[in-house]
Image (cartoon, grey):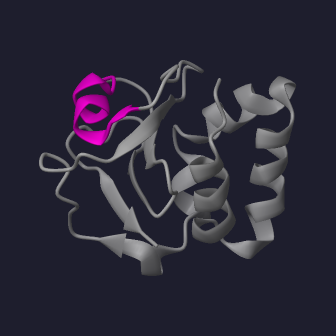
Amino acid sequence: MIISDGLRKFIGNAILKPKRDRVLGFLSNSKNHVKFARTLDHEFYKLLDKSYFRNSIDINSSNELGFLYCSNGISSEKETSISELYGKAPWEGGWLIVNLSGNFAIYRPEGKIDDEVFIEL
């Protein structure tokens, strides 16, 4: 799993303080990347600072690049446009798309098809 600087920045700002260090710890060690991926199914939602939630983000006109992280441990292997990543996100399991600068993300918990959370820092 590629852990981008954008993902680290996003986690550092979007996760509530009591759990922030724990999640950042998952990113710092390749053995713990699986633990991070597993949080994407349900636990991740509880960790987010809801004050950053937005009604939408215009992903279709976005030329921004980012990475896709999935609860099954599969993530994008290279920088890809946000709109393309959104189209490739799996129907099952939780996933997170984060742009390269880490200032916005799209998150969908497992079982919440078409019920994504848009987060902008």
Count of marks placed on residues: 0
121 left or right of 57 in image: right
Which residue is at the front of the view, 40 or 119? 119
Where residue 79 appears, x then y in whole percent? 45, 31
Q: Quadrant of the N terminus?
A: top right
The picture places residue 43, in percent across and down from the top left corner, at 60, 49
Task: Pick out the residue farthest to the left.
Answer: 61
Res 46 → quadrant: bottom right
The secondary structure making up most of the magenta span is: helix
Magenta residues, as a range? 80-90
Say which residue appears at 28% left-offset and 23% top-offset.
88
Please name the residue shown 20% across and 63% down the image: 56
Residue 86 visible? The answer is yes
Q: Is residue 58 left or right of residue 102?
A: left
Q: Is residue 86 magenta?
A: yes
User: What residue is rendered at 55% in x and 40% in y?
Assistant: 40
**Residue 95 in sight in this render:** no
Q: Residue at x 53, y 45 (%)?
A: 42
Query: Where residue 12 sits in the image (x, y, percent)?
Result: 69, 64
Decide: is 102 above or below 109.
below
> Residue 18: percent from the left, percent from the top?
78, 71
| Residue lying farthest to the bottom in this orientation | 51
Whether residue 92 sits left or right of residue 50 in the image: it is left
Magenta segment: does it hold 112? Answer: no
Q: Quadrant of residue 108?
A: top left
- The correct choice, above or below, for 107 with respect to 72 in the image is below
